[in-house]
Image (cartoon, grey):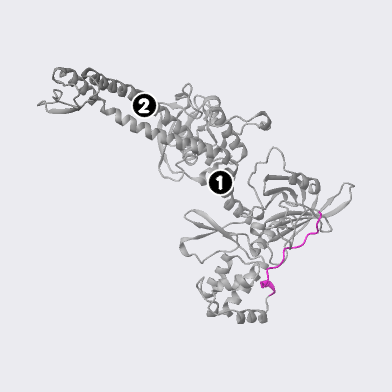
Amino acid sequence: MPMDALCLSAVLAETAKKIVGGRIDKVYQPSRDEVLLHIRGTDGPCRLLLSANPSRARLQLTNLPRENPAEPPMFCMLLRKYLVGGKILSLHQPPMERLAELDIEATNEMGDKVRRRLILEAMGRRTNLLLLEGEGRIVDCLRRVDGDLTQARPLLPGLFYQYPPVQPGKQDPSALTRETWDSLLAQSKGDIPADRFLLDHFLGLSPLIAREVAFEALDEVDAPVGRDPEKLGQKLTALLERVAGGQVQPTLLVRQGQGVDYSFRPILQYGPETESKSYPTFSALLDDYYQAKETTDQVRQKGQDFLKSLTHARDRLVKKLAMQTEELARTKNRETDRIYGDLITANLYRMEKGAKVLRAENYYEEDCPVIEIPLDPLKTPQQNAAKYYKNYTKAKTAEKMLKIQLEKGEGERAYLDSVLDSVSRAEGDRDLEEIRQELMETGYLRRRGKAKEKMKRPATKPLEFRSTAGLRISVGRNNLQNDRLTTKQAGKWDYWLHTQKIHGSHVILWTEGGPPDEQSLQEAAMLAAWYSQGREGKKIPVDYTPVKFVKKPAGARPGMVIYTTYQTAYVDPDPKLAEKLKA
């Protein structure tokens, strides 16, 4: 759900305990819509994320690592200038508004203490992040809003900031009186759904919470408000009192193993098909809920420049392979051409000039049945025979060449599939940059001009894990890493693991010169299954063997190896194990 005012108030109450009184040490802007503050809090260092992404607007403490761009954006540099070293005095929210406000005491260029505010407006497509001077003048904002677009409230540097206008006709439910409630009921039709009544007349409620209040009061999410308006009002008041009193429970809604929504309380309206999973903190809940979604979106946005080329190349290759397969099937009929040539040669004395068909006994079959051989009337008998012999020879040569081309094409398709698999598991800019570099080296992307070359970053490191027995396990993020791990870094007695006939990462179990224990092998195999295209399946076959039996053929594409003397384990991919063993 979008973070409504009630959920935001619960998150802010949790967050304020950690950051109020702390100092801002560093400011980063990992993406266009996100700002990350590193804070020295009273209970130790913490990181505060302010996301102004319209579909993921929120404020939260986070433990997830975020990759920063090589050059910080201008808004990030501005925040560093105005906020680094500042002390957080308060974190608060205007009543029932999707707005979070940080009051910060910082110093100006003269060394004098000044008050500044950082405001997150978490309001759907109008989500924004603004920096204000003490008197309320806008220093700058993440998204500047010209007066031509919205005359009511332009947001530009130098203008005085105003809170968003209150939606007309809506009441603050925390200030609700009996007279107001009765008046609203009198104005509404009794058959209007209760959740729609709540959304139309009160601020700060999301559709999810409005339906839950209606369900709790009337046993149905779409029950009419006239069924029991008294009980509906009581349930709404009780909900607001619990939130105000801090009686909240961070809850993730899980359906078919996937997080589909979250709230500040258990949700019962969906029945047994949706589980309400409790979390100890909102920061842990929001990290879990948004991690996979953000990674997928970042890969889609930042990798779209080469994903389109990569997908187009694969689709074109698939069509080419289909055509070559059909052509190869046609070469199987070449023996007929040879037989026709032989029969024409054997029956030259019987052929007449200008004939279109030769009827002759086929002595290649039992009983020598009479067959009809098509002829070109403009050619001599010898030329007709030569034509069939030529077709036979051409088909024979084509079969040989087509088999070579199909084998090469299948290898190329397997390589492109492996790159697409690497892209699906990329976790940031560096992963995508390595994949882009790989595609340039293999000729699928053009090399950048000198003017476009960016500062070269150090290569990313493989994913690192520790088995229960303490052995190190490395998992390649892409084909270039797979090659480095397997052919350059791993020792000949370390163990190499890979899913059988399924694209995935190379996994190295570092044995430190001794034989690996069975549990470590099992765990490494489960990691190989999880970091592969088979991660959604069961009983995935994973081959494993000492590295000395793994070879890279000369001229092979990145990530392509051959291996012998291996064993196979059948394991179930387990994301919880990957999280547990992460180093």
State the residue at coordinates (57%, 43%): 299
Expressed as whole percent of the image width and height from the top left, the position of residue 354 reads: 20, 24
Where is the N terminus found, in terms of image quarters?
Answer: bottom right
Expressed as whole percent of the image width and height from the top left, the position of residue 346 reads: 16, 18
Q: Is residue 293 above or below residue 348?
A: below
Q: Nearer the viewer, residue 171 or 150?
A: 150
**Tag 2: residue type?**
Leu
Give, as a single range, the part of the protein colored magenta: 158-175
Question: Can residue 280 be seen here?
Answer: yes
Where is the C terminus found, in terms of image quarters?
Answer: top right
Question: Can residue 518 be seen here?
Answer: no
Residue 450, picture quadrant: top right
Lateral position of residue 151 relative to residue 530, left or right: right
Give the labeled residue for mark 2: 402
Q: Is residue 486 above or below residue 56?
A: above
**Tag 1: residue type?**
Thr
Lateral position of residue 25 relative to residue 366, left or right: right
Q: Nearer the viewer, residue 147 or 22?
A: 147
SS of the residue under disc 2: helix
Q: Is residue 570 above or below residue 179?
A: above
In this view, the residue farthest toward the left is 367
Give the labeled residue for mark 1: 296
**Label 1 neighbourhood size at 10 Å, few (<14), some (14-19), many (20+)?**
some
Residue 579, picture quadrant: top right
First along the sequence among labels 1 and 2: 1
Expressed as whole percent of the image width and height from the top left, the position of residue 218 reads: 52, 75
State the residue at coordinates (51%, 44%): 577
**Spatial separation of the CA atoms under disc 1 and disc 2:** 39 Å
State the residue at coordinates (48%, 26%): 547
Circle number at residue 199 = none
